[in-house]
Image: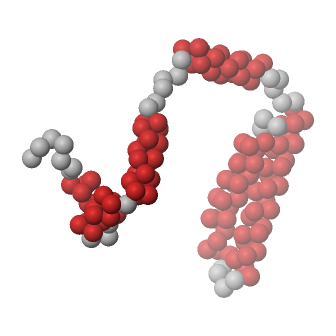
Amino acid sequence: MPTDCLDSDSLVSIGLAFNWDCSGGLAHLSSCGTCRDALQDLERVHGALAHRAEPGRDLVDAVGAAIDAQRQLERQSPAPLPEERTYTLAVGVVAALACFVILVGQASASAQTVQTVWLPAAVLSVAMGAGVVWRSRRV
């Protein structure tokens, strides 16, 4: 087989493109100027997109410097005040309790017993409260 022959995947793609009427599709492609022009346009677009330029050293250095500056800024930001920590903890506890009450109330409203729901509800509630505390710790 000559080296310029198509591989199996390419042939399957062509077959699918022509809905397996390959001889009719190839005849149309060879005689239709609109399709040939469109295929040439796609070839040019592919060639333009296939060429990837490596970022310059200046760009890499600038991005690295921006990341370092942001890290330095985050290190210098003041720690939350004790009142803010207390407030954040209170919000997390209230969120956990609200979640627990809603889940247990939903279970008692349905046919489920509260005994089968309280442990998963408690675990989910604590996770929700911890999530609120975690997200709001840097506010």
Locate residue 94: give its quadrant: bottom right
* Front in this rendered view, residue 46 or 29: 29
Apparent side of residue 62 relative to residue 44 in the rendered image (left or right): right
Colour setting: secondary structure
List the single residue furthest toward the left.
1
Q: Is residue 20 above or below residue 72?
A: below
User: What is the x, y in percent for residue 133?
Assistant: 76, 44
* Front in this rendered view, residue 41 or 1: 41
Locate residue 61: give its quadrant: top right
Number of numbered tags placed on the structure image: 0
User: What is the x, y in percent for residue 113?
Assistant: 66, 80
Apparent side of residue 116 relative to residue 80 in the rendered image (left or right): left
User: What is the x, y in percent for residue 69?
Assistant: 71, 18
Q: Residue at x 83, y 43 (%)?
A: 88
Q: Residue at x 44, y 53 (%)?
A: 38
Which image quadrant: the C terminus? top right
Apparent side of residue 15 relative to residue 62 in the rendered image (left or right): left
Apparent side of residue 5 relative to residue 85 in the rendered image (left or right): left
Q: Is residue 31 above or below residue 48?
A: below
Q: Residue at x 76, y 56 (%)?
A: 96
Q: Is residue 109 visible?
A: yes
Q: Residue at x 73, y 76 (%)?
A: 106
Locate residue 121: give its quadrant: bottom right
List the single residue furthest toward the bottom.
111
